[in-house]
Structure formats: C-alpha cells, structure tokens
Amino acid sequence: MISVCVPTYNGEKYIREQLNSILCQIGEKDEIIISDDGSSDLTIEILNSYNDKRIKIFHHVNRKKSKLKFRFNLTTRNIENALKNAKGDIVIMADQDDIWEKNRIEKILPYLNDYSLVLNNCKVVDEDKRSIHESYFQINKSKKGFFKNLIKNSYLGCCMAFTKESMEFFFPFPKVPIPHDIWIGLMNEIYGRVYFLDEQLLLYRRHGNNLSYSSGASNFSFWYKMEYRIILLFAILLKLLKKK
C-alpha cells in the first residue's frame, strides 16, 4: 500500500493539476493523505469535488500569524499531521503545486526494497511550467553525506519516498523550528540507507508562495541559516542520546 502525503494551504491554483498527476499512478488500495492547514480559498472544495475514496482529508490547526523565520515550521507541523495519518507501507511526499512525471512511482519503488529513503531528481520550473533548470541535483550539487547535507542541504521534501519502517528514525519531528526535509534526510543518513536517483521525476515549481523551506531558502539570512543548523545539530545529538 502506498500513501502519498500532501500538505495543503491555499493551493487552489495548482492542486488539481498535481492531484491528477498522482491519481493516475496509484492503485485502488492506495491513498492520498491531505493535511490542510486552514485554507481560506477553494482548496477543500476542489479536493471534495473528486469524490474519490483514495483522497483522505485531515484538518490541521489553522496557521497563526508568525515571524517569517518560523514560516517553514508551520509547514513542518502540517506535514507531521499527514505522516501521522498515513497507513501505507511506502510513503511518498508531494507538494501541492508540483506535477509528477507519469512514471515516478514505477521508477522509485524498486529501490525501496534495498534502501530506506529514495530522493529523486526534478526539473525546476516557474509558476507557468517554463523551465528554469533541467536538473535540481546539478544546480544544488546534491549528493549523499551527513556533513555535506548539514552544511548544504540536498533533501527536498517533495522528491522523497521512504519506507514506513524508516519513520522510526525521524518521527515525530523535534519540537523546534527545523525544516522537515533536512531532518528526514539526515536521520536516514544516520540510521538507514539513502539512494539518490538521478532522474527528473517531477516538475518542481518555484514561486513566491511555495510552502517548503527549501524552495525559499534564499530569503533567509546567512546568520539565520547558521542558527537553524545549530538547533538542528542539537536536535540530532539529543536523538542520538535517546537511542542509546
């Protein structure tokens, strides 16, 4: 069974195109877990219009006004709510505004027999699907390695798939403001096995309203990036001590 986890918040502009690209790839016993963070637009109405039992909507607490530096933490909690409700043996992450290539699931599933987490490459496009970069891995210099990714993160949440068993490595998320994708990736680096699949299996939209931290990292100051990495490192050390 596959669970596709999609955090939503005011995603009416793109959510239908993303859902259509996912639904054609999953089976009747699979599920799409939507965790909505209090959308005030037509997101929920669009989701309900599908009348598809595979789409399961869970309402997260409404997001509150917050300083920009903590914006990604609101998304992290929304994703945590989606993961908590996922029942599948395989969990695949998805953003509300991207578009999957037709063979994403077919390409990643075989690797999850041997690896706890697969990170696939993607094409970077603008809001109108015009190409910005052909390869996220190339422009980001993405590769495995704990210290490499602690310094410069390769893990993009919407490109991740992992086994249900691997969630014990990273779930629940620490109660501190750190990006979920970096945490999931680094915990799998420590306790599991990760595979970087250099095939562009989705169109990754970059625009001003992206929900993920990784999509808007350039808006954050150098000193704040240092601050969150220190918080991240302490959270990892605490996790390691609890494991002993």
Image (cartoon, rainbow, N blue to C red):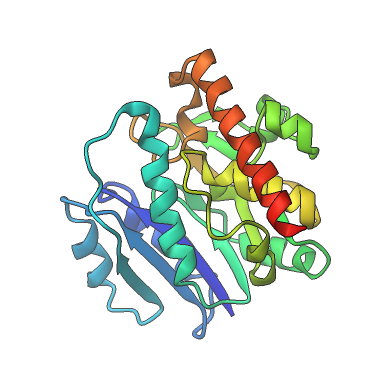
Q: Who's the residue at 83% across and 66% down the image?
A: 114
Closer-to-camera residue (202/160): 160
Give the vertical position of 67 relative to 121 (above or below): above
Q: Quadrant of the N terminus?
A: bottom right
Residue 115: percent from the left, percent from the top? 79, 61
| Residue 198 position (above or below residue 71) | below
Give me the residue at 39% from left, 46% from top.
75
Q: Is residue 175 left or right of residue 15?
A: right
Q: Position of 231 compared to 43: left or right?
A: right
Find residue 104 and report its image quarter.
Answer: bottom right
User: Relative to the observer, which residue lies in front, 2 or 201?
Assistant: 2
Residue 63 visible (yes or no): yes
Give residue 55's quadrant in the image. bottom left
Quadrant where the C terminus sits is bottom right
At 65% across and 65% down in the image, what residue appears? 168
| Residue 120 in view of the camera | no
